Amino acid sequence: MEKLKSSRFTTFDIALVAALFAIGLLGTLTLYSAMQGSAPEGGMQPHQKQLIWWGLGLMGMLIVILIDYRHMEHYAYAIYACSLLLLVYVLVMGRTISGARRWIELGPVSFQPSELIKLTMTLALAKYFHHHVKQGRYNLFELVVPFLIFAVPFVLVLLEPDLGTAIVLGLLFFSIVLFFGLSQGSIIALIIGGIASLPLGWLNLKDYQKERVMTFLNPSEDPLGRGYHIIQSKIAIGSGGIWGKGFLHGTQTRLHFLPEQHTDFIFSAFAEQWGFAGCLLLLVGYLLVIFWAFNISSRAKNTFGMVVALGITFLFFWHVIINIGMCLGLLPVVGIPLPLFSYGGSFLLVMLLGVGLLLNIYIRRFIF
């Protein structure tokens, strides 16, 4: 009977892994349709580059699966420190695009260390909580070290500047901490401190970042300028109707009315072609992946594996929520990609490495 239950769970797991690659296939097809008629970058279309990154990501995922995740715990701080050095290197020697210094040139490709830090920070936090498990809730004084693990990359990423990634790091950190539990007094102190710091945070935003917030509040104020992205995104999503206009038949996408339709607003391009039904199917796929990852976290054999799986779960969750919220005009545009969907090699590689870690933890759930 126990063997039968295990077999059923394994089959269910394989189905959910298949859902991951189904999402990736839909993303590549949408990327192909979104960039029809555009000039190739360096002799290659974006969807062709994305396929190369898929190949690299799958190789990286396989390597991660083969290494027992419990051995990674010994080197978690070292891996985290290396990723911090890469962030520092970016600020000094990185490639600048549109006023942001975020990329390291690696021959014909560019890599963003700010994407990697999402994963390595999770490893470092997992190592800390693995060795500092507490019965009951934590207070703020007991979280000084985890806060520093979060704060250092947070500041470095803000200096690039990359507000979207900094927000994700913050959400990832506080999601993990709240999962472990905070005392009531600590939660109240954080809320008061957060509200009190809002004016200071606003004053330190770049002008274009302030414009994004104001545009979110009133996109119709400048429909041909700052509000253009959000308005065109809403038009694309609404024009898809229930069943969509069909693959390669989205007018907003095909005529390039929708800006950044292969990165930040790829969900809008997908919605126009596949409609509400396609979006619902895509969201179900993401929900399956998120619940699957959370289940792996709950079945991990130690705290390190639990926190790593939990962090990757939150990473998927917040990227999906923020990206779709941006496209619908429910959240400000902060440049957050859609997992396994948006164009971007660094983010795709990191997410596939995260999937590899999840499978690593899942495979070794019965090994003591």
Image (cartoon, helix red, strand yellow):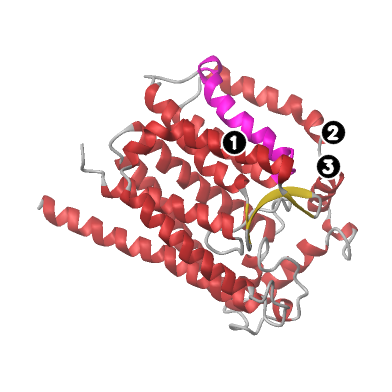
Of tags 3 and 2, the one toward the viewer is: 3
Is residue 87 visible to us here? yes
The residue singled out by tag 1 in the image is 84
Quarter of the figure with residue 324: bottom right
Residue 269 position in % (x across, y down) = 65, 72
Q: Is residue 173 above or below residue 233?
A: above
Q: Is residue 65 above or below residue 192?
A: below
Q: What span is colored magenta in the figure?
A: 139-163
Q: Is residue 69 above or below residue 146?
A: below
In this view, the residue in front, 123 or 211, is 123
Label whose residue precedes the other's in the sequence (2 or 1): 1
The residue singled out by tag 2 in the image is 203
Residue drawn at x 60%, y 36% is: 85
Of tags 2 and 1, the one toward the viewer is: 1
10 Å crowding of disc 1: few (<14), some (14-19), many (20+): many
145 in the magenta segment = yes
Amino acid beneath label 2: Leu
The residue singled out by tag 3 in the image is 206
User: Does the CB distance between marks 2 and 1 fall below 8 Å?
Assistant: no
Q: Is residue 221 above or below residue 100?
A: below
User: Does the CB distance between marks 1 and 3 fall below 8 Å?
Assistant: no
Residue 222 position in % (x across, y down) = 90, 60
Secondary structure at numbered mark 2: helix
262 in the magenta segment = no
Amino acid beneath label 3: Lys
